[in-house]
Image: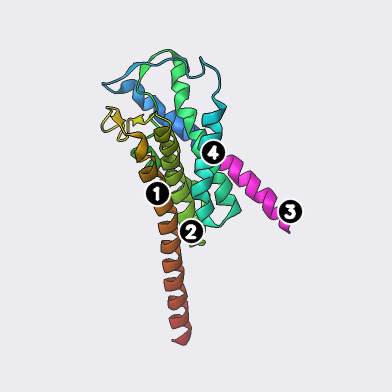
Amino acid sequence: MWVNKRKNDLVFIIKATLLYGILAAGFSLLGIFLPERQFLDNPISGGLDWFHIIGHIVWGLMIGALSFSLRYFLLSGAFAIIIDWDHLVQFLDIDAIGRMGHSIPFGFLAAVVMMILFSDLRNRNEHYLLGAVAFAAMLAHISFDTLTGSGNFPLFAPFYDHLIRFPNSFWFVFQLAGAAIIISSMILAKSHISKDKDIVKKSRRS
């Protein structure tokens, strides 16, 4: 039973992570059509930066830990690094807006798509938590970028395609916002579960 559950969790994490990455890559293509587009360098011309890869995963795991769920703990770490698939557009050698996935509109899009395709409406906690993790992982990612001095993002792209720069100290705000979203989703789920139970009790009495 425990082994089967872990297998199901692993399959879920792999599928959800791949979809999240595909969404980030697809969303980045919008940057080709925006006015502020410019030529983007090859993202791995200097080699892989393992410090940033591990850092993004750890930052995602930090907020995922608040879910008290192994599935969503691991998923937060995976989302927080796979979002960098929005850099794939840079391999096309064309003008575009970089880091399109590092934006609030992408966070909302990813949350909605994940909730529609993967979560079960009958399980309120899982339903809200999946959407929250999809959004919060984006915030965790840009939190680490901000901390390490890469804090300029098209935060409201595609509606506003100018880069917005944040000071290094602002990393805590993004990470705190991500944590707040996770906690809020759990509170909301419990509230709905409680209301559903009350409705069932009243219907039985009547």
Query: Dots 3 and 1: beta carbons under 8 Å?
Result: no
Residue toward you, 143 or 118: 143
Question: Does the magenta-highlighted stretch encompass residue 18?
Answer: yes
Q: Is residue 104 magenta?
A: no
State the residue position of label 3.
3
Q: Main secondary structure of the magenta part?
A: helix
Mark 3 and mark 1: Cα distance apart in space: 34 Å
First reached walking from the N terminus: tag 1 or tag 2: 2
Query: Quick one: SS at disc 1?
Result: helix
Q: Mark 4: which amino acid?
A: Ile
Provide the secondary structure element on which disc 2 rests: loop
Q: Residue at x 43, y 12 (%)?
A: 93
Residue type at tag 1:
Leu
User: Helix, strand or loop at disc 3?
Assistant: helix
Kindly identify the amino acid type of the residue bearing the numbered disc 3: Val
| Image side of residue 56 versus residue 106, left or right | right
Q: Earlier in the sequence, mark 2 or mark 4?
A: 4
Give percent across and percent down for residue 98.
38, 24
Percent position (x, y) of residue 162? 27, 27
Classify mark 1: residues with Cα within 10 Å, few (<14), some (14-19) or many (20+): some
Name the element at disc 4.
Answer: helix
Mark 2 vs mark 4: give the one in front: 4
CA–CA distance in space, label 2 to label 3: 25 Å
Whether residue 21 is visible? yes
Q: Badge 1 is on which residue?
A: 176
The residue tagged 2 is: 121
Work out whether mark 2 precedes mark 3 in sequence or the reverse, and give the earlier one. Answer: 3
**What is the crowding at mark 3: few (fewer than 14 residues within 10 Å), some, or many (at least 20)?**
few
User: Quarter holding the C terminus?
Assistant: bottom left
Question: What's the magenta region?
Answer: 1-19
